[in-house]
Image (cartoon, rainbow, N blue to C red):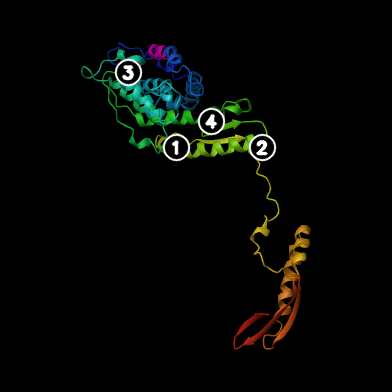
Amino acid sequence: MSLHESLKGKKTTNGLVDFYEHISEVKEKAPAWLKGIKKNGIEHSQRLEGYLDKFIAHEFEKKLKPAEIFILLYAVYLHDIGYRNESGNIDHHDHARRSKDYILNNPGTYLFDRFPPMRAGEVPLIAEAVAEVCYGHAPESRCPLASIRNRFGDAFLCKDILNLRRLAAFLRLADEMDQVYIRLGHLRDRISLPEIETGIVRLHWKGNRNSGEALDILVQEINVTLEPVNDLLSEWDFPRTTVVLEPTVKKPAPQGHGDYQKYVPEHYIQPRCYGAVEKYEKRGHWRELLEAIKWFFVRIIIDLRATFHIPLRSDDGLLHVYARRLWNWQDVFLL
């Protein structure tokens, strides 16, 4: 049973507003409210409702009060009306706040005039509740979930205390599932709808490595965004949700040891064993290379009690290295 269907027969305290019928009317009006908003338009809201139907399985649906499901579905179709700014232009920045403001400033436009206010001239409490949940889908840095009320009362709607914070967390959870279609719209034909299971969401994709890497970065960002959502919902025994790509993106194997030449000083004189490094590096015989280096230095420090002379050939001439022992330490002179 979908969340919407679960509202059949459920009404406000006085029985004047039928929850199921009212949400049906909201769905009919929503295309006009979201007209001209392409990425976050009516199809986006419809997908979010579908995601919530899968996330909120029967056992959790029973934990939600009918009035809470009513508010959540209302918010699904109003949370992005703020994508169009006051000038009528599409503007993503701070759109969640504008959605909240539009609801509170014009409640009648969004069918809240069916609900009586506490006092004449005031906004109906149900409009306040939906507006607050809509704002809750904003980034955590702008609207922390902890700032949303978890004890909200509206005697006209129902006699119970409502948890708006939990509803905002569910809205944000569903909204994040649709980010691949919103932010990477050019890859829509390569991504299937999220496969939602308990605790895990799989995004099936196809395409080249560039597509996979772009999706992988976005999935990592989604999982970070879901951390406060998971923290809050886990207190309600709701499973923590992780998003993964199917298939996973294979990371390219590291090539060699990097371009170390750029770190070599301009006037550095290469030692005689320099050529051997490249030789052994190509062959991968690191054990033999280390052994050669070890004996190279053993020959230099064969007798610290005596001064000895080792000529090393360089491109610019002969480099003479003298080493001698003075007391209990060595001096090395480059002449």
As helix, strand or loop, the secondary structure at mark 2 comes to: helix
As helix, strand or loop, the secondary structure at mark 1 comes to: helix
**Disc 3 designates what residue?**
106
Which disc is residue 230 wearing?
Answer: 1
Mark found first going from the N terminus, 3 or 2: 3
**Rendered image quadrant of residue 256:** bottom right
Q: Is residue 316 left or right of residue 161?
A: right
Alpha carbon separation for disc pair 4 and 2: 18 Å
Callout 2 crowding tier (Cα within 10 Å): few <14, some 14–19, many ≥20: few
Image vertical order of residue 97 relative to residue 311, above or below: above
Mark found first going from the N terminus, 1 or 3: 3
Which disc is residue 275 wearing?
Answer: none
**Rendered image quadrant of residue 32:** top left
Magenta segment's dominant SS is helix
Find the magenta span and give its range: 20-26
Callout 1 crowding tier (Cα within 10 Å): few <14, some 14–19, many ≥20: many
Q: Is residue 151 magenta?
A: no
Alpha carbon separation for disc pair 4 and 1: 22 Å
Marks 3/2 in contact by CB < 8 Å: the verdict is no
Mark found first going from the N terminus, 1 or 2: 2
Which disc is residue 183 wearing?
Answer: 4
Q: Which percent across, then down, holds residue 290?
A: 72, 68
**Disc 2 designates what residue?**
209
Q: Which percent across, then down, holds residue 9?
A: 38, 12
